[in-house]
Every structure is written in structure tokens, then in C-alpha cells.
Amino acid sequence: QVQLMESGGGLVQPGGSLRLSCAASGRFFSINNMAWYRQAPGKERELVADIGNGGNTNYANSVKGRFTISRDNAKNTVYLQMNSLEPEDTAVYSCHLDIRDSVTELYRTYWGKGTLVTVSS
């Protein structure tokens, strides 16, 4: 059974930085796309950034130049480095992984439970 463990959320002042991590564990063949989503209070969930197996990345316009997504395939982990944080970045951040099953070899989507990021003075 696949499990995702997120860490790194918390309270930070405007202009500060945080680094989120999401590690996958269990039995699986490989991980394809890895992504971070966020949902702010009263708003719909939105894609923040994603990274393909080859390292190609995609960012929401609102975080370009401030956030960096990366992955460590040996550790089955995706990271989100968040710099110059703004109050508008306050949200629950969840990781989203496309994981290939070790038996069926079919891809299945897994979500982390979410970690709260609060940007406030």
C-alpha cells in the first residue's frame, strides 16, 4: 500500500521562506508526474507546480519566480521551495503523485493529506 508523508508547513512572516516535502513509501514500480496543489479558505483548489519524470516543470503564474519544485527520485520525494511568501499564499498544500503499481503496472493518483501554510505578521 502506498503512503504519502508531507512535512514542512507552518507559520511564516511575509517575505519568509518554507520548504515542503512529500515522500512516497510502500510497494510501487515508479512515479511519473509529481505536483503540489493548494486550497485557500473559500477558494477552489489550484495547481501550484508540477514536475515530470524528466524534470520538466510547470508553475502557476502567481508563484513563478518565487517557488521552485524539485524531485529526488532515489528518495521518492517531491519538494516545494517557497520564497518571498505573501499572505495570499496562505492555504493547505497537498502533494499529488502519479504512481505506477508494481503488479498491474497501471498508474494511479495519490493525494497527500495536506499541510497548512500560513503567511502572516
Image (cartoon, rainbow, N blue to C red):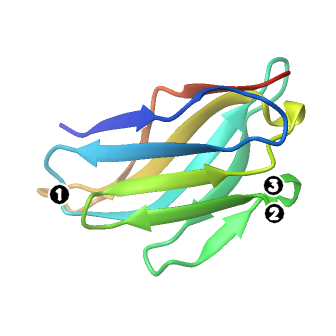
Mark 3 neighbour density, 10 Å: few (under 14) some (14–19) many (20 or more): some
Q: Residue at x 62, y 72 (%)?
A: 57
Q: Which quadrant is the N terminus positioned in?
A: top left
Q: Nearer the viewer, residue 34 or 101?
A: 34
Image coordinates of residue 29 in percent, x first then y, are 19, 62
In this rendering, the answer to whether 15 lies above or below 62 is above
Question: Distance from label 3 to label 2 (Cα)?
Answer: 4 Å
Callout 3 amino acid: Val
In this rendering, the answer to whether 22 lies above or below 103 is above
Callout 1 amino acid: Thr
Q: Which residue is mark 2?
A: 64
Question: Distance from label 1 to label 2 (Cα)?
Answer: 37 Å
Q: Residue at x 30, y 46 (%)?
A: 24
Callout 2 amino acid: Lys
Q: Secondary structure at mark 2?
A: loop
Mark 2 neighbour density, 10 Å: few (under 14) some (14–19) many (20 or more): few
Q: Quadrant of residue 40 in the image?
A: top right
Q: Which mark is residue 63?
A: 3
Question: How many callouts does the rendering have?
Answer: 3
Image coordinates of residue 51 in percent, x first then y, are 55, 67
Q: Which mark is residue 82?
A: none
Q: Is residue 38 left or right of residue 13?
A: left
Q: Nearer the viewer, residue 40 or 75?
A: 75
Q: Residue at x 50, y 71 (%)?
A: 52
Q: Is residue 12 left or right of residue 74?
A: right
Circle 1 or circle 3, nearest the eye = 3
In this rendering, the answer to whether 86 lies above or below 115 is below
Q: Which residue is mark 1?
A: 104
